[in-house]
Amino acid sequence: MQIGMILLRLVTLCITVVSFGKPALSEPSKPNIVFVLVDDLGFNDFSWRSSDLQNAWPNVNNLVKQGVRIDEYYTHALCTPTRTAFMTGRMPLRQGLQNGVLTPYERWGVPLSERTLAEKMKAVGYQAYGVGKWHLGYYNNASTPLQRGFDRFYGYYNGLEDHFTHKIDGYLDLVDDGHVDASRLNQYSGHLFSEKVESIINDHKESFPEKPMFLYYALQNVHEPLQAPAEYTDSSACAHILNPLRRVYCGMARAVDSAIGNLTQHLEARFEDDVLLVISGDNGGLPMAGGNNFPLRGQKTELWEGGVRNNALLYSRTLIPSTLRGTLYTGGFVHVMDWHATFLELAGASNLAGLPTDGFNVWPAIMQNSSSPRTEVALNIDPCTGLPPFTSNCNFTIGGYAQAAYRQGDYKLLLGVHYDIVIPVLDGASNASAEVEWYGIPAASGGVKFNKAAGLKDGLGQTSWLFNLRDDPSERHNLYDTHPETVRQIKAKIDALAKEEIFACGSLCPVDKSAQRQASKLGVLIPWVPPNDEALS
């Protein structure tokens, strides 16, 4: 008995040493994670996929050779919903942020009951940094990045700022850790944010060498207004493009590539340990602002593939096996909110308490090129048709909706979706013939010609659509009338999910006059609601 007790104590001592001493060799380290979000990047605008801008991406093209591309990658159709999905890991319809985007004077944002990805990463030992675009609400201080988990944030709160003056509606929107930065007038945001990222990386290595880093780098490019320094628009990658919008857009893409090149160079110089870099678009491109989604149908704001299917690239020197370098993941589709669950799993934070997420950990599937755990996704369920100020047909009853799009397997169902919702057309309106579908077709000159596809006029007036995306990724052949059982199955899922939809007000929120008064008085856009008056939070 005594010998047994001695052996038991020795085993207990060994377990104690392994548990509380130096981690066992088999325990995985927490990687540094960098997520780069490119604003308004069209399907035909990025690196390997682009028919005319491929030379604008030399740095990314090099990463493509060593990384993994995602073939079927989805976001939402607009900035705020995509950022909401990524940051919370939950569908925007659960936060009332599914229609349109937040404007500068709305008393709304991601509800404070939600825990952001930054908050969760901090809970397991990460330092969290944000640079660039926020667009998730700032009406009160509690909604700003520094109160939502970020240790540092440099960037802007809204979504349509001038790239040089950093103003929207004539008001400055640029903050450095919560303080207005009025010292950067006429400095291009692409350069400014790149410099700040380098500074943050240096500071992190000096101040927190033992802690992993989570960096959220939300670029302003290639979002309108179309602005780029001549060094990019006149470069050999862009100078040949005849279409003036497309040429400036090319310059903005070239600026993004330069920023990514600077980022990767700096990461590899400063980090010897694991770094995972993920580059993603946030929604489809906007042809009237130089973007292009060929050969997909539709554009930013729309639920067609051109509005919600995008590009994503993973790169790591150490985490991606050599057999996968330069490959295309074809095991199924991935949604932007899946990065939330994936990053948490890599960080060892998957069991944190909080609201249930809608995302999946896709890392094992991508690393094995096996079937994605995601087999369906609600691309949106919206109480209104169209966008402010042209919203119509709003249905705010429980379980009601005006339009929806849902993909299940190879099939995608769209309900209440007009031929082109960017041109607002009410049912039965006399101008229904104005409904058009924009396609950007690459031209031999290296530019793009924008056409109204005459061959698709047979769909005018229709609002219900079903497509087999495996056979018809461009959504040209409507199967709605010939596949009633598939329609019934997917519609039942939409109807069930619609009952969970929150209607808050989103982009339908009334303008808060106090926000406008403060902006007019101060000349800047900062939180305006005091802590004791935080309704809707």
Image (cartoon, helix red, strand yellow):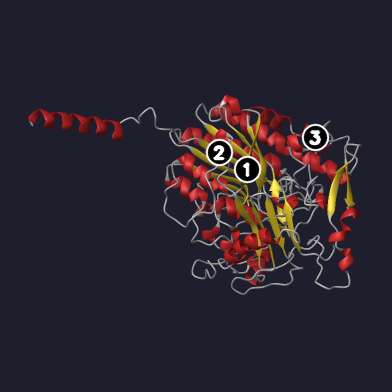
Q: Give me the C-alpha separation between circle 2 and circle 1.
A: 9 Å
Residue located 70% across and 44% down the image: 189
Say which quarter of the image contains residue 437: bottom right
Above or below — where is 349 with respect to 382?
A: above
Q: Amino acid at mark 1?
A: Gly
SS at mark 3? helix
- Where is residue 57 drawn, in percent x and y? 74, 33
Closer to the N terminus: mark 1 or mark 3?
A: 3
Label 2: few (<14), some or many (≥20) within 10 Å? some
Above or below — where is 401 with respect to 75?
A: below
Nearest the eye: 416 or 230: 416
Q: Give me the C-alpha separation between circle 3 and circle 2.
A: 41 Å
Label 3: few (<14), some or many (≥20) within 10 Å? few
SS at mark 1? strand
Q: Residue furthest left?
A: 2
| Residue matched to label 3 | 231
Q: Nearer the viewer, mark 3 or mark 2?
A: 2
- Where is residue 327 drawn, in percent x and y? 65, 31
Say which quarter of the image contains residue 211: top left
Q: Amino acid at mark 3?
A: Glu
Query: The N terminus lies in which quarter of the figure?
Result: top left
| Residue matched to label 1 | 332
Q: Amino acid at mark 2?
A: Ala
Q: Give left or right: position of 453 versus 263.
A: right
- Do labels 2 and 1 touch, CB within 8 Å? yes
Q: Give me the C-alpha separation between circle 1 and circle 3.
A: 39 Å
- Where is residue 369 drawn, in percent x and y? 59, 35
| Residue matched to label 2 | 365
Say which quarter of the image contains residue 65: top right
